[in-house]
Image: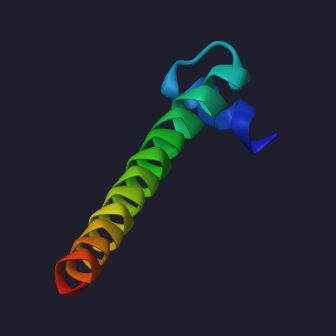
Amino acid sequence: MVACFESARLGIHDPEDLYYLVWVPIELIAAALAYAAIMKLWRWYQGRNAAWRDSA
């Protein structure tokens, strides 16, 4: 019900469009943070793996 009032106030005809406008940026930010975390873990793992190979 709140989405109807907010969408009308923002000039959006369909309240469903408001959900897309909110969720798409949230999903993009979450995907970027997950990618950054995976890359950081991968670099840590590769550095650890290289140190182990150099010492052997």
Please tell me which residue is depicted at 55% across the width and 30% down the height of the picture.
Answer: 9
Left or right: 28, with 55 as reference point: right
Residue farthest to the bottom, as pictured: 55
Q: Position of residue 14 (x, y in %)?
A: 69, 15
Q: Nearer the viewer, residue 37 or 54?
A: 54
Left or right: 43, with 34 as reference point: left
Q: Nearer the viewer, residue 56 or 15?
A: 56
Quadrant for the C terminus, please.
bottom left
Q: Nearer the viewer, residue 20 or 15?
A: 20
Image height of 8 relative to 35, above or below: above
Image height of 7 relative to 40, above or below: above
Q: Position of residue 17 (x, y in %)?
A: 63, 21
Please tell me which residue is depicted at 29% across the width and 66% down the height of the picture.
Answer: 46
Q: Position of residue 49 (x, y in %)?
A: 31, 73
Left or right: 13, with 4 as reference point: left
Residue farthest to the top, as pictured: 13
- Residue 39 placement: quadrant: bottom left
